[in-house]
Image: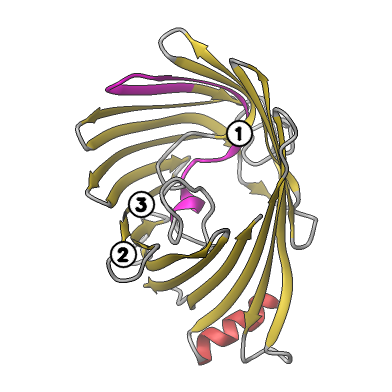
Amino acid sequence: MLQKNKNSAIRRFGYIAAFSISFAVVVYAGDIRPSVEVEFNMFYNRNYPQPLSFQFREAKLFLDANISDHATAMIEYTMKDNLVRSQLERAYFIQHDLPLNSQLTLGQFRNPFGYFDPFTVSHSTTKSTALTPDSLMPKFMLRDLDVGLYWESNGEAITFGFGVTNGNGINDLKDDNNFKDIVGHAVYSFGELQIGLNGYYGKKNSMLTGEVVNSYSSVEVTAAGVEAMAYIGEATIAWEALVRNYGTLHSAGSYVTMNYDLSSILPTLRATSRVEVFDPNRTVLNDESIQWAQGFLYTLSRGYLAKLEVVLNLENLHRRANEVFFELEYEL
């Protein structure tokens, strides 16, 4: 129903406006830090019988604990709007202070492939949650939620990591195939500039055969990426280009994003600009998508944040709505 009305709005007005309010509560109990984040959306769509609607979006439950001086644990559970898609997002154990200034992560986590998550619109580069719900690149990049282990070494100039996961994509701590994925990255830093490489190799279940996924056949998945990040005064600029081969399907994408300070115009105001280009199938002509997003993050007072984001979509085959998102956030 929502999608149908959204498409109608695209034909008539070309935009959707969404307003969201989120609350975060953190409780410290010794070395254990439980917290809850709850987010609601208020949608405005003139094609709805009731144009203004208020909906629950999601709730996140966190439990972060120090097990020892050299180890921590993290659990994150997300409840979505319809509860059907709710799942255990993260559950991992990290052993710190290993040789080569490294750490080992064991459990369920996001594959460390690509930059995108730390560089979202309307958040500073230290945050990881995007305000925009349907950016182009996250659908393409291989930051799947997987079970496995990941080892990372952090040097003064070189950081590199290597991981092996169960290769099942988004899951609830289950593995219904026998294919394992390997992911790795390396970053070299000099001065205010960083350059890096990402690699991915694995196998996924084959495409649908009728109505059933064939768990005993597979397609090979490979991906590679190059990235760069620069710090210029109060601005951070990141660029990334990636290619992925999923069997005979070849995709490619690139983006550049900049997070910068606008406190000279208005105190505590920051902004982020992002341009993305995504080609879902390089063998098909004129199917590229281009998305430009402009976001602003303003600290109202202690604990209160206001976020505004405008997203413009330019597509050759299918026209999507341009979107405006506004969010008020309070952290207790």
Task: Check the picture and name the quadrant holding the N terminus.
Answer: bottom right
Q: Residues within 10 Å of mark 3 (few under 14, many from 20)?
A: many
The residue at 30%/40% (across/down) is 227
Residue 140 lies in the magenta stretch: yes
Position of residue 60 relative to residue 175, above or below, is: below
What amino acid type should be assigned to the residue bearing mark 2? Leu
- Give the Cα separation between the discs numbered 3 and 1: 23 Å
Judged left or right of residue 67, residue 303 is left
Q: Secondary structure at mark 3?
A: strand
Magenta segment range?
A: 137-162
- Give the Cα separation between the discs numbered 2 and 1: 34 Å
The reply to whether callout 3 and callout 1 are in contact (CB within 8 Å) is no
Can residue 218 be seen at all in this image of the molecule? no
The reply to whether callout 2 and callout 3 are in contact (CB within 8 Å) is no
The residue labelled by disc 3 is 253
The reply to whether callout 2 and callout 1 are in contact (CB within 8 Å) is no
Q: Secondary structure at mark 1?
A: strand
Position of residue 266 relative to residue 155, above or below, is: below
- Marker disc for residue 109: 1
Q: Nearer the viewer, residue 93 or 240?
A: 93
